[in-house]
Every structure is written in structure tokens, then in C-alpha cells.
Amino acid sequence: MALPCLLYSMDLTVLNLAVPAITADLNPSATELLWIVDIYGFMIAGALITMGTLGDRIGRRKLLMIGAFAFGLASILAAFANSAGMLIVARALLGLSAATLAPSTLSLISNMFPDPKERTFAIGVWISSFSAGGAIGPVIGGILLTWFWWGSVFLIAVPVMILLLAVAPRLLPEYRDENAGRIDLVSAALSLAAVLATIYGIKHAASSAFDAEAMVAILAGLAVGIVFARRQRRLAEPLIDLKLFRSLKFSASLGINVLGFFAAFGIFLLTAQYLQLVLGLSPLAAGLWSAPSSIGFIAGSLLAPRLLGSMRPAYVMAGGYAVTAASFLLMAQAASMGSLYLLVTSYIIMSFGLAPIFTLSTDLIIGTVPPERAGTAAGLAETSSEFGGALGIAILGSIVTALYASGMAAFDGGGLSREALVAARETIGGAVDQAANIGGVAGDLLLAETREAYASAFHAVTLVCAAVSLLAGLVALLVLGRIKPDAEEKCEESSVEAAA
């Protein structure tokens, strides 16, 4: 079950290095290129809830195998796409297929490991596979692009999916809700539209500006979401049982998950830019220096079950957020000093702090619901991750952009043309391009100014992330503090049985 999750996250990052080669080969427009990169994540976010609920109805192993087969075919289609439009369609199909993988594997874990301690450990392994895939994606992509054409980054999924299809019927049991009714197609369409519109608006605000287009998309998504919620209340067999949200443990765990991914996704993108545009690393070198963070994620994910045996979940999560806040303070120091080694170290510590949070929040979300609702809960857990990541990229990216522009406002241009100066003040990417075009002393001066402005903005954002982490830790303590550790619960259960 870890194999498809590894590929799920790899496809979110492996394409980044292939963008220049795809641009040279397919010659996409700026809009087409944006959709090539983003449509995969959009379709995943929009379809997660529907796919999770579908697994409850038709069987979680069956949905996993259907998704794996479709993912393999879509990967082949993407690898041999001969136009930008064909690649966009292939990436959309990849996203729909990938949306079946996370909910079906997570809900299978819930059913296969009824023992809470074993389930927490299994979810830790599951979380580790995602972090490992995201870390090694750029590395594998860089190696493949060195020797093969850009389509090779998609073909790596094919043998893995073939292996999964071969062994899943032997290794994985089937689970489904025998009393589930038909899936409501109108609700499925409404959930897809609500999530897609909202995520699109948030990402548009991050990449461009919070303009009318972003506002209309977000408001439309929220309006459709309200219609969706009202429909669920009227249906005898809703797509999502809204009664799940009455559980404080369930709702709080979703919120804590959102805050964790807010910090993780936002800082991931900004760190990648810092490594390449401030420290001057190549994309492959930046990917290699980012890879050690997966060690922190794996270690933290596997440590969580051990801590949970003697500590309350809220204390483990609050401790994880405290470590995460400390890592952001260290990251701020690294940005001020321009130290690559300190930045990588802080990134590993951040991963180590966040991993138990993701493991335990996911465990609480899945463990709170009845077994027949595990697919729905898994879809909601993954959707909360997507929303948290999108919000982090949008809000933190907007803060960095505003602070960078403010830092560059005092730069007189050093003899640059008006157009070049405007481009340099808008984004650091534009400034680096202008510095390369100008060259000489003027180019070096512009590059030094832009790097200093971005480093200052990055420093400020890490402090914001530290504050968010402390806030999330406080929420975990206040809301989830009454949940007891496994050892205490087992002791109480034994006492009750003895009394009986």
C-alpha cells in the first residue's frame, strides 16, 4: 500500500524539473503550461471526497486496483503526449486516478489494523511513503532527464502499478460497507465543483494576485459548498454524513492537520526558491539538498506510536509543534546568515516535528469514525491536507511577495531601464532573469539587492510559521487534551472487565 502513495506524491514534484524540456518540445502557451503543472493537484483535491466514499460502497481494494490500472494508463498517455492539450488531459486523468489511491489505502489500513497501536504505526509508515516520494521525486526526475526524454518521468509509475496489480489480490483483503446505498452523482459533482473552484481561487491568488478572478472563484466554491452541505442534510444516504463533524475530536484533528500542512507546503515552495534563487543552486542540487528532510519525516512518523503508548496524543502533537516552531526560528537564522547547512538542518528538524502531528491527526480522524465510514474519513483527511497546503502557498507566498516588493522599493535601479526595474521589483525570478541579461557590475548589483530582499522576506515568513505552529500546538492541548494515552485506556478497560 505504500507503493502507490510513493508515486502519488512523486508526481506532485517530479514534473518541476521537466518543465523546461516540455516547454521546448511542446511549445505550450503560458496558460497551457500553468494547467500542465497544476491540473494534477486540482483533480486530486476535487475528487478525494468522492473517491473515498466510492471505496466504502464498491470495495476499497477494488477501488485501489482500478485507480492503479488507470494511473498506469494515464502515465503512458502523459509520457507520449505530442501536444500541450494532450498532456493536460493526461495529467487530469492522472489526478483523478491518484485521488483513488490515498483514501483507499488509508481506509484499508483502518480495517486491517483494528488495534490502535498497530494502526498508528501503519499510518506512520503510510505518511512516510508520501514524504519519501515528495523528497526523491526531484532527484529521480533529475537523473532521468539527464539520460532520457521528459516523458520518462511519467513511465516510472508503470512497473510499480503492474506490481501492485499483481500482488494486491493476494496480500490485501477486501472491505466495503454492505449497507451502503448508491452514490449520489449530484453530490459528487457539487463536491468536485466546490473544491476545484476554491482551490483554483486560492492558487490564483498565490501565483498572480487576489484579484476579481480569485475572489469570484473562492466565493463560487464556498457557495457551491453550502449547496452541497444542505443537500447532504436532506438525503437519506448522503455522500458525507455531516454528523461526523459533531465529534470534537474529528473536527479538531482536521483543523490541526490543515495548520500543519499550511506551514509545511508553504515553506516547502519558498525554501525551494531560496535554494535556487538566493543560494544559486541548480534545480537538481536543490532537490538533493532537500532530500534529507525525508529522514526527519520517516523518523518522526515511526516515533509517534512509541510516544503514544505513554503520552496523551495532545501532548505528542503539542510537542511536535514546539519542535516545529523551534525549527522555523533556526530557519530564520539560516536565512539571515545565508547558511545552506543550517537551512538543511532546520528543514530536517521541521520534518521531524511535523511527522508525528500528521500521523496522529490522521489516526484520530480515521479512528473516530465507524469502520464503514473509513473511506469517507480518509477522503476528508486528504482534502484537509490539500486545503492546508493551498492556503499555505497562497498566504505565505503573498506575504513574501509583498515584503520582497517593499524591500526592493528603495532600489534606484542602478541604471536599469524602467521595464527591467518593474520586472525586478515584482518577483525575484524576474530580477534574476534581468540580472543575467544585463550582466557586468549592474547585473551583480541587482542580484545582490534582490537576494537580500528575498532573504529578508523569507526570514519574516519563517517567524510567521513559528507563530502558527505555536498556535496549533495550543489548540491541540486545549481541545484534545482529554484524550488518554493507550496505556491508560488499556488499564481502564482491564479494570472495567475485572469489575464485570
Image (cartoon, helix red, strand yellow):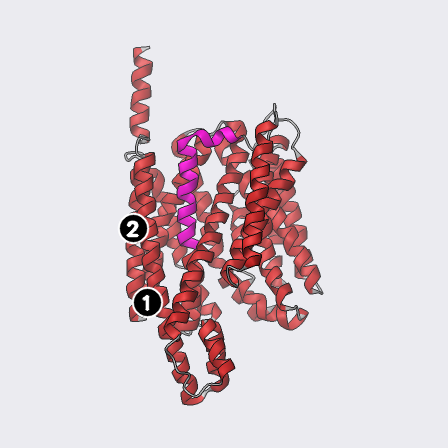
Q: Classify 267 as above or below 474.
A: below
- Under mark 2, the amino acid is Val
Q: Name the mark on residue 435.
A: none
Where in the figure is residue 287, as x and y percent of width and height? 45, 64
Proximity of marks 2 and 1: CB atoms separated by less than 8 Å = no
- Residue 307 visible? The answer is no
Residue identifier under label 2 = 323
**Most common SS among magenta residues:** helix
- Estimate how packed mark 2 is, as few (under 14), some (14 to 19) or many (20 or more) residues with alpha carbons within 10 Å: many
Q: What SS does tag 2 mark?
A: helix
Where in the figure is residue 26, as x and y percent of width and height? 67, 69
Where in the figure is residue 408, as x and y percent of width and height? 39, 75
Q: Residue furthest front?
A: 212
- Magenta stretch: give its range: 242-265
**What's the residue at 35%, 55% (across, down)?**
465
| Nearest to the observer: residue 186 or residue 40 | 186
- 404 horizontally vs 222: left or right: left
Number of numbered tags placed on the structure image: 2
- Quote the CA–CA distance across marks 2 and 1: 18 Å
Membership of 237 in magenta stretch: no
Q: Classify 28 as above or below 489.
A: below
Q: Quadrant of the C terminus?
A: top left
Membership of 260 in magenta stretch: yes
Residue identifier under label 1 = 335
- Under mark 1, the amino acid is Ala
Which quadrant of the figure has residue 476?
top left
Q: Nearer the viewer, mark 2 or mark 1?
A: 1
